[in-house]
Amino acid sequence: MTTDGTRTQDETLNFGVLREQLWRAALDCDDTHATALVRFAVEEGEPGQVQERAERVLLELIAPVQARVGDQWAANAISVAQEHAATAINERCVSAVADIAARARSGPSRGRLTVACVDGEWHALPARLLAETLRLRGWSVAYLGAQVPTEHLVAHLHQRAADAVLLSSSVPAHLPTAHTAISACQAAGIPVMAGGAAFGPQGRYARRMQATWAPDARAAHELLVEGLRRPSVEAARLPDLDLPHLSDQEYTVVRQTKRQLIKQTLVDVEIAFPPLRSYSEFQLERTIEDIDHIVTYLATALYVDDADLFTTFLVWAAGILSSRGVPVASLLPVLDSLRQQLKDFPRATGILAEARKALTVPRPGQPA
């Protein structure tokens, strides 16, 4: 309760209840109810606090619901179709919040920013939440959306000057592409801030790529207010200079021989894992996709020289497979085949060995 007897937003709105209601609306494909919920949450209260309420709705209501969508898909509790529909509804909700907040926005711009997802990154909602939060805090933001090719990003920067570029990526497999984008923007004299799960715990990979890292939208704002150092054009460099271990060519070999590695791995898995022989065409296609992902993440781990990246992915993938009735043991012959094929590459075999030790495989008689 405030001194004049009015109730604060925390007292009139229960965000826990609102999150559950938005979750149900998203699952029910009820965009009318979902947008009404977020509009109510933003508009309920003093007119002068619209922007503060809008930020809370973005970061404390919509964002947690979207995180739950991902968690439920991973647990096989919702389908891909439900995941896509719920994401689309959350995007509608972000737009509804932005429309309300735009009417209350005033004052001079703090500066010009460009927000984009790296090429190949389709998970655009985190970047959109970032862009709208920064707009609420007074920044002029050009939001470019999902999977922006690096050359088009740089061309945009030449057309519309920016004080900083903020790059988002959720999938670690896109790190090599992200690194290229970071270096290209910096070569154009624009400082880069990176964010998203792809950049690792505490942004370890962003820092290796010479980018500023922000754990969330509010932290990004604070770092921008402090000011990012603008790189000199003379300091332009090739991405490989940030990662000297790439000189051993292991990453390059795995990337260039990916198709052959997948093909031989499938042959080896069929020998070591007999149930594969009776898989349907659909199941076989999914298996090839899974092997493709494993090789891609192995290459990415080699790129950043971090076995934890591959191990974390493999343990996550094992959980996904297990929730869909695929035995975790089916991953072992994949790792063994890759170790044999890459036996002359010490970093690759070391990463594969560490990941194999991290897998928890049920003993015979135990549920998979």
Image (tube, grey):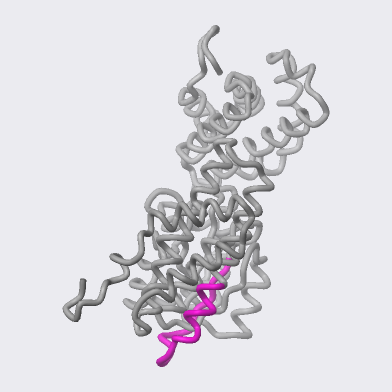
Residue 308 picture location, percent across and down = 45, 38
In percent of the image, x 64 and y 24: which residue is there?
Answer: 326
Identity of the residue furthest to the front in this view: 5
In the image, residue 155 above or below residue 333: below
Q: Position of residue 300 (x, y in %)?
A: 57, 45
Q: Position of residue 175 (x, y in %)?
A: 55, 53
**Going 28% across and 71% down the picture, which residue do you hit?**
8
Q: Which residue is the extreme one toward the right?
A: 281
User: Front-most of 53 and 124?
Assistant: 53
Q: Which residues are magenta?
A: 96-116
Tell whether 19 sits left or right of 251. Answer: left
Residue 316 appears in the figure: yes
**Between residues 10 and 218, which one lies in front from this camera angle?**
10
Q: Quadrant of the N terminus?
A: bottom left
Q: Is residue 274 left or right of residue 301?
A: right
Reply yes or no: does residue 70 show up in magenta.
Answer: no
Does residue 160 sit above or below 92 in this rendering?
A: below
Q: Is residue 121 visible?
A: no
Residue visible at 40% across and 74% down?
Answer: 44
> Relative to 200, is 260 above or below?
above
